[in-house]
Image (spheres, rainbow, N blue to C red):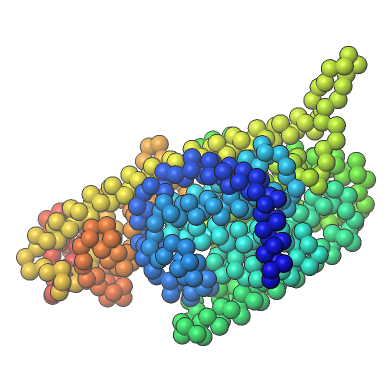
Amino acid sequence: MDSFFSILKEKIEKNRAQILFCVIATFAVGLVTHGYMYLQDAVSHDSLNEFYGYNEWKVQLGRFITPLYKVLTRGNMTLPWLIGLYSLLWMGFSVFFTVKIFRVTSKVFTVLIAGVFATNIAVTSTTATYIHDLDSYMFSLLMAVIAIYLWNRFDRGYLMAIPLVAISMGLYQSYLAVMLTLIVFVLVLDLLAGDVFKTVFYKGLRSVGMLLGGGVLYFVCFKLVLAITGLKELTGTYNSMGNMFEMSVLDRLEAMGSAYTTSLSRMFRPVSTLGALVTALTAIMVVIALSFMIVRALKRRMGYAEIALTVALLAVLPLFMNVSRFLSGYSHDLMHFAVWLIYLLVLLLFCSGRLKQEGEKKKDTDGTCELSAASLCKCICVFVVVVIIGSNIVLANQAYMQKDFEQDANLSFFTRVLDRMEQVEGYDNRTVPVVFVGRPQSFPKGQADLGFETSSELLWCNDPLAIGSLYPERYQKYFNYKLHYSIRVLPHEKAREYQFMEQVIEMPSFPAKGSVMLMDGVLVVKFS
């Protein structure tokens, strides 16, 4: 054990400058991108449920390490600024291990890699509406990247990585896609660097063993935690673990097709302030990257087996990037972190130490230098990535401003609702239960305000109602946390009955007179 810590200390000392640079670069880009939201209260959608605690649900979903992570870092309360700092720290370490995996030495490219990670649209979507999960997701990312580093760096590193795979999945199962994506990147670069089929194939088999071992360890630990806590696995929801065991062969094939189309759609038509230009830029970048690979393969005189394996790996990449859709039949923006790593692959073609760039400049007869085709391709791809990173920064801040306005609008709206509730004779918040019927008319679902059309396309940004899904507990949490006013809300099943009552149907909608009234000892608030 002492020798392990001695080696660890030596490694940290040796890489201190690079670690520090990666963390600083990530914080610099990350704060410009997400700092706005780190300074907001961020009580929105699922954050209402998980503003404090709510860890049982996480365990039942298979994210059983999340409660332990919270206890060891920032407690059960959602603290945006602290969560943001932790998130950027874990992300900075992830950038460091990424540059170590691919032997990146250029500081310029390190900053670009930090930009790809920090401005990832999945991170923006999480920060906007699920910030309570952000730091645990980024720690899951870190565990995933370290696992790939160990597998790639050491002969038996895949065995050491098995617990890290399990930890990553125990925080957020969807980051399995990140591990699969990085594995493909490593193997493709190895092939382009001249490694033979047999070497790369067996290295790939070790990665399969690592992921299977981690998956089995994760599953066993999950069942043990359920047995110890007495909780039951959550079923019947889109993100239930059991979904992947209930899908038929036809369902699986359909999910495979959907995984491909979703990945390619997100890749070439991402939510962007650039509009249609981002599609053209991405297409140019991908064509250049593929052309570079082809030229590289021809120069290296790659064998047929190596070419076939490279093509197979690239062909399966979109599926791996969206493996959650393939395994469970469903995925959303929060699960698509790996899709946006396509920009990382393009950068690695020009900065990875595995691919030594040859003759980027050539001399003319008069002694002057001109850019080679490889250097020109690199400049174009770097330009495209920089433009996309910049647009993602703008998109994130636009989304956060929209969420900020949303918070103000909701506070104003529900303050008016509360005022009307208290004016009803006989209402006592300690004894009289409340039922909310319908949807507030002030917040038409899916209507984007002028200037926020783009950010409204992000997950849950197309609905300016901060409460999100209109379950009674959301109203309960909003009144408790935002208004500091305790109310008794009827449970979901009982609340649903009111929308079909004739007397309620005949009531006008808020804010009309008669939209808030006592009915058989229950205060009914009708929104629509």
Instruction: Using the image, determine if residue 183 lies above or below residue 298.
Output: below
Q: Dividing the picture into quarters, in which one does residue 360 lie?
A: top right
Residue 18 is situated, as x and y percent measured from the top left of the image, at 66, 46
Q: How many marks overall?
A: 0
Depth check, front residue: 245 or 504? 245
| In the image: residue 401, left or right of residue 65 | left
Residue at image position (12%, 55%) is 513
Left/right of residue 274 with respect to residue 456 in the rendered view? right
Residue 322 seen: no
Residue 160 falls in which quadrant of the image?
A: bottom right
Quadrant for the N terminus, please: bottom right
Q: Is residue 235 above or below residue 397?
A: below
In the image, residue 45 sits, relative to residue 385, either above or below, namely below
- Asked if one can make out residue 103 in the rendered structure from this viewpoint, the answer is yes
> Which image quadrant: the C terminus?
bottom left
Work out whether residue 442 or residue 339 is closer to the camera in this orientation and state it: 339
Q: Look at 53% across and 60% down and name the residue there.
A: 137
Question: At which x and y percent is residue 155?
Answer: 81, 64
Query: Which quarter of the picture shows residue 259?
Result: bottom right
Q: Position of residue 94 (x, y in %)?
A: 62, 53
Residue 500 drawn above or below residue 33: below
Percent coordinates x, y for residue 315 in the rendering: 75, 54
Residue appearing at x 63%, y 40% in the figure: 112
Answer with left or right where residue 84 lies relative to residue 510. right
Q: Is residue 76 left or right of residue 528?
A: right
